[in-house]
Structures are given as structure tokens and as C-alpha cells.
Image (cartoon, rainbow, N blue to C red):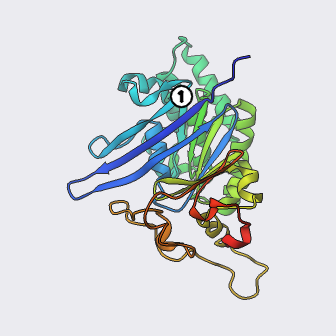
Amino acid sequence: MEEKKPLLEVENLEVVYQTDEATIRAVNGISFSLNERETIGLVGETGAGKTTTALTLMRLLPERTGRVLGGKVLFRGENLLEKSANDMRHVRGAEISIIFQDPMTALNPALTVGDQVLESLQIHNTTGKSKEELNARVDELFNLVGIHAERKKEYPHQFSGGMKQRIVIAIALACAPQLLIADEPTTALDVTIQAQVLKLMENLKKELGTSMIMITHDLGVVAEICDKVAVMYAGEIVEAGTVEDIFNGKVHHPYTVGLFNAIPNLDEKTERLHPIDGLMPDPANLPVGCKFGPRCPHCTEECQQGMPYLYENNGHRILCNLLKKEVNNEELG
């Protein structure tokens, strides 16, 4: 029996932003794959390269400054980076959709929310459905995301932030895409609304069989809805594995340990927060060797000189010289 290929394969992707002053190295040779009905979480601080990765997959990099220097993005075996602009217009929305992190700016204030959902259906109406059938699909989508269909004639300013995000999700799911990219979809929402939106996305994913890339800095979100995790730092994936590997594994990258330590601990009577010292490096002037080295408490001269050692155990991959031999998690903390 022939082995089934992943839905998405990203291989050695390199992306830069070229300005008159500098070359910003945003994504530096990352690789990951995603199977059907799977969710992978891209985790890391602001500036790690998560959103640039998403924009590259959608071919939405800024035309004047964004450049893909190398790598492949294979979607169902076809390299999206080699497709024409016209071909990509047929892919976006129909096969791959994206939910942007701010619902306040993702919707057009001059159009009704119903017309904005309808627009996506009209663009990808390849089967010649009638206007009545398309409008019926709009009603179905509104009901699917928990909004009464009669509200489709209202404008974005008449909805709360959480309701706007539900509308954005309806637009993204309008054509039943195989892959949904969610770029921090709950960042601008209240905590209680965040939980509702995440629950909605999880239910829709199961119901529609959609694969998902969840971009977030929140490890709680990852634990809730992801199957696999890729921890990004300075444009690199420094650790990748299943949710079980990341949350219950015995060894971790020091940066992953730092992310876990930064989660507020209500049981501690003294210091509840343990932030990672220092800042993300300037992508226009990345350090030699391990990019996390300047912030790592375990950094050695060897770490500063060349590429870190690649540790791999049953698909759990970590870039760190400390793992030239297996050590326990306490030694990395």
C-alpha cells in the first residue's frame, strides 16, 4: 500500500525582507509537515517569524520587500512558490484560508458582513451556483459560527470584537478549505471570548475535517487544540514534536523551558513570573551560531561558533548542543 503524503510540506524555507538599509532575515531554513485533519502550533515570541511563515504560505508577502530565497511549500504535492499569481488566487480562500489576528481591521466597514461572506463564495463559484444557493450558503455559515442569519445585513461596527472574529472565521471557512491558517486569532479578544472562539474553531475543525496551522504565543492554546508543535525563535524552528513531546517530554530546548517558566504560577507565594532575560536578536544582525545563545544560561563557546547539534528521538527534534547526549529536563531548567 502506497504511503499517504502529508497535505502540506514546508522544506528549508528562507524568507527575507530587503530594504535600502538592511536585509531582514525573517525565516531561516524552517521545515515542517502537516497531515490531513491535523493541527500544528507555531509558537514563539513576537519577531520569531511566525506571521512571515503564514504570509509566505499564502503568497502574500509584500511585493517590494518580501523575498523567498529558497525552499519549497508543497501543498498536495505542488509547490505553491512556483504557481502563477492567477493560480494562487484560485488557491486562496478555496483551498487555503487565513484568519488574521485583528478582526477589527480584517473586515470592510463599508460593506455588510453578509456581502463580505458572499464575496468569497462568488469569487470561487466554479460550479455555477445560483444567487439563491450562494445566499443560502451565507445563512448556513452564519448559523455555523453561532450568529443569527438575519444579522447578515448589518455592518461590522454593529458587532462586538468576538462576533467580528466569528464573521472572519465564516469568511475563511466559506469554501470549505483543506487548510486553515489562524494567525493569533484571539489576541485582540477578552479572555472569556477567547475561550468561546477557540472552542468554535476546534468544533468546526472536527466537523469539517480541516487541517490547521495555529500561530500563537500562548502555550495554553497549543495544549488545547494542537496535535503537533513547532517552537520558533529568530526565524528557526528550535524544537518540534507532538504535543506530548513538548508538554511531557524529558528533554527540551532552553527556549522552550523559558516559555514554560514564563507562564504565571499562582501556587508560588513570591515571584509568579519568570521572564526570559534579554530580547529577540535583531533579524538584520543575527548572532553567529545558536541564535538563542545571547539569552541562554547554558551558552558555551561552542554554541557561539557554529550550528547547534540536532537532537532527534522518534520525531522529537531539538537544536541544542546540550543534547549531544540525552539529559533530563532539570538540567536544562
Q: x, y (%) of residue 281? A: 42, 66
Q: Which residue is located at x 49 percent, y 61 percent?
A: 46
Q: Is residue 75 visible?
A: yes
Q: Which residue is located at x 67 percent, y 59 percent?
A: 219
- Asked which secondary structure carries label 1, the reply is strand
Q: Is residue 167 left or right of residue 327?
A: left
Q: Quadrant of the N terminus?
A: top right
Q: x, y (%) of residue 137? A: 63, 25
Q: x, y (%) of residue 277? A: 53, 77
Q: Is residue 93 visible?
A: no
Q: x, y (%) of residue 210? A: 66, 33
Where does label 1 land, which residue?
A: 75
Q: Is residue 18 left or right of residue 43?
A: left
Is 161 or 98 nearer to us in this picture? 98
Residue at far left of view: 20
Residue at far bottom of view: 270
> Which quarter of the figure has residue 147?
top right
Q: Which residue is located at x 41 percent, y 44 percent?
A: 14
Q: Quadrant of the C terminus?
A: bottom right
Is 76 or 55 nearer to us in this picture? 76
Is 245 or 178 nearer to us in this picture? 245
